[in-house]
Image (cartoon, helix red, strand yellow):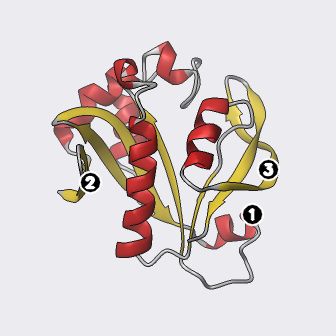
Amino acid sequence: MLIYQSNEIIVRLLDEIDEQRLVQWLSDPKVLQYYEGRDRPHDLNMVRANFYTQDDAEYRCMVEYEGKPIGYIQFYELEEEERNEYGYGDTDEIIYGTDQFIGEADYWNRGIGTQLVQSMLAYLVNERQARKVVMDPQTWNDRAIACYEKCGLRKVRLLPEHELHEGQMRDCWLMEYAP
């Protein structure tokens, strides 16, 4: 099901036909270095468990560029636990979070990640009435942070030892977009 299209980018809900592509991307050490960790290569069972059988309110989507599947994005409205963890427990504003990666390394360093994030921000603000959109990249992930800053997100809070990555708890930045 189509979520939105913006120029060459299409974002659609995951379909069963996407399983093998996710396995391919999430077993590639170049991708895993940034997403999930090189110590967590995914097989088909892991992809199904993590992307298809979750009982939550996340929208898990395939990203297509010029008709070719090249990446993954998920978005979700923050729930009470995340609101409290991120310091938004005292507001009832609509706040969304996103996570994404470009799985086809040939499409890295071409500005497509920036186009994807910009288009998702526009979708969440205009179609989902988000007042804020947040992301929590690991502090060492300079490429992601630079992309998010280029799209208008700003670092608002350090989240110490926030995410397990390659065997250790890593610090993350809470980054916020507030139109």
Q: Are marks 2 and 3 in contact (CB under 8 Å)?
A: no
Residue 148: which numbered mark, if any? Answer: none
Q: Are marks 1 and 2 in contact (CB under 8 Å)?
A: no
The disc, 2 or 3, on the residue closer to the chain's N-terminal end is: 2
The disc, 3 or 1, on the residue closer to the chain's N-terminal end is: 1
* SS for dot 2: strand
Spot occupied by residue 13 in the image (x, y as percentages of width and height): 25, 52
* SS for dot 3: strand
Q: From this view, report whether residue 68 is shown above or below residue 75.
A: above
- Of 42 and 173, nearer the camera is 173
Structural crowding at the residue carrying mark 3, measured as other residues with C-alpha within 10 Å and reported as few (<14), some (14–19) or many (≥20): some
Q: Are marks 3 and 1 in contact (CB under 8 Å)?
A: yes
The answer to whether residue 54 shows anywhere in this view is yes
Between label 3 and label 1, give the one nearer the viewer.
3
Residue 6: which numbered mark, if any? Answer: 2
Residue at (57% x, 18% y) in the render:
38
Task: Tell whether 45 sits left or right of 39.
Answer: left
Residue at (35% x, 35% y) in the render:
71
Which residue type carries mark 3? Leu
Which residue type carries mark 2? Ser
Spot occupied by residue 140 in the image (x, y as percentages of width and height): 73, 30
Task: Tell whether 23 sits left or right of 92.
Answer: left
- Of 88 and 175, nearer the camera is 175
Count the marks.
Answer: 3
- Of 50 and 151, nearer the camera is 151
Per the image, the residue denoted by label 1 is 85
The answer to whether residue 57 shows anywhere in this view is no
What is the distance, in whole Å, between disc 2 and disc 3 at their CAs?
A: 32 Å
Between label 1 and label 2, give the one nearer the viewer.
2
